Amino acid sequence: MTFSTKSLAGSGYVILNVLKGMNITGLLAIIAASVFMLIKTTTDSSFFFFDAVTHVVVASVAIFLIVSEIGIFSGYFARNWPLLSLEHGFVGLASAMVVLAMHVLACLNKPSNSKEHLGMAFWRVVIMAGILNLILGVFNLIASFAFRNSTLGITARQVRARGAEAADLAAIQRTASTAKSMSSRITADSSLKQFRTSTKEEYTLPSYHSPSPEPQQQRTPVSPSLYSRATWCSKKKFFGRRKESVGPPLPVNISAPYDFESQFPPTIARPDSTLHPSRDTESETHRWRADR
């Protein structure tokens, strides 16, 4: 069952606060029962210390739950024990009260906690604390689901603390959370867009139509006379070591084929080979003339 009107929230405010007082009373009864059983703990067994520590722990848990029900240190409970804060219902409290009640009732099964050993007054306090907390745990569990509104995000603890104003405060908080989520989403989108833009600018692929590189300055050839041939030797290995040349490599210039006709015009005829001195029959060598 969920409440849909402020009148039901107002009635729930009264009912839950009455139940709150009963919860504190039941937890005080748990503390009293634990103290009585601690006092009546027998030392017949060598493990009585652990029995006494169990009663101390149960009383400490009951005190802790009372502090959460009073409402002090709400910030501490919201940070460290959220099941006992305003953001949650009474499921955690009801479960703890049921466990404590079962433990107290189970202790009556021991011979040291019998009616004869505890006495009629103490025994009644112990059994009353167990039954009362068992019933209150069930009531808290029912109230946690009866006075909540899952659609509006209102818990039974908020109804107990704020009454009819819980719906209005829930609407305000829901609007604020929606606006905050939208602003955070916008901020995240803008940061993502900026990141994509910067990444795109940083990691742009090179264009296939990039401008041609600037022509490099032509180097003037070095005259071969500046270096000796010994310094122009290529890299050679000498006993496993590579010896590098000191100077730059020689420029290799291959000349064009020799053109005889360009050097000697065709107007000049070649002398007759018969007129060569080697073909002369005379023993004395003499000069030959072209007009002979």
Image (cartoon, rainbow, N blue to C red):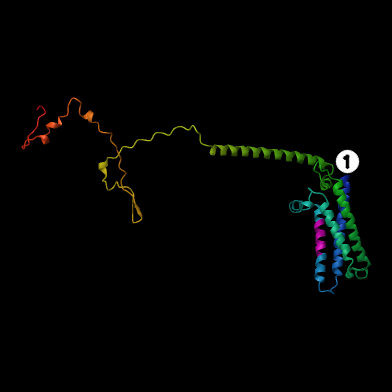
Range covered by the magenta-colored residues: 56-65
Residue 66 versus residue 274: which sits nearer the camera? 274
Could you say which quadrant of the image residue 50 lies in?
A: bottom right
User: Which residue sits at x=89%, y=44%?
Assistant: 11
- Most extreme residue toward the left, as rendered? 284
Where does the N terminus fall, quadrant-wise? top right
Left or right of residue 176: residue 257: left
User: Which residue sits at x=80%, y=55%?
Assistant: 67
Could you say which quadrant of the image residue 174 lies in?
A: top right
| Residue underneath mark 1 | 7
Crowding at dot 1, Cα within 10 Å, few <14 / some 14-19 / many 20+, comes out as: few
Task: Please check the rendered image and state whether residue 59 is part of the magenta-colored stretch, yes or no.
Answer: yes
Could you say which quadrant of the image residue 223 lies in?
A: top left
Q: What element carries label 1?
A: helix
Q: Can residue 226 be seen in this view?
A: yes
Left or right of residue 155: residue 231: left
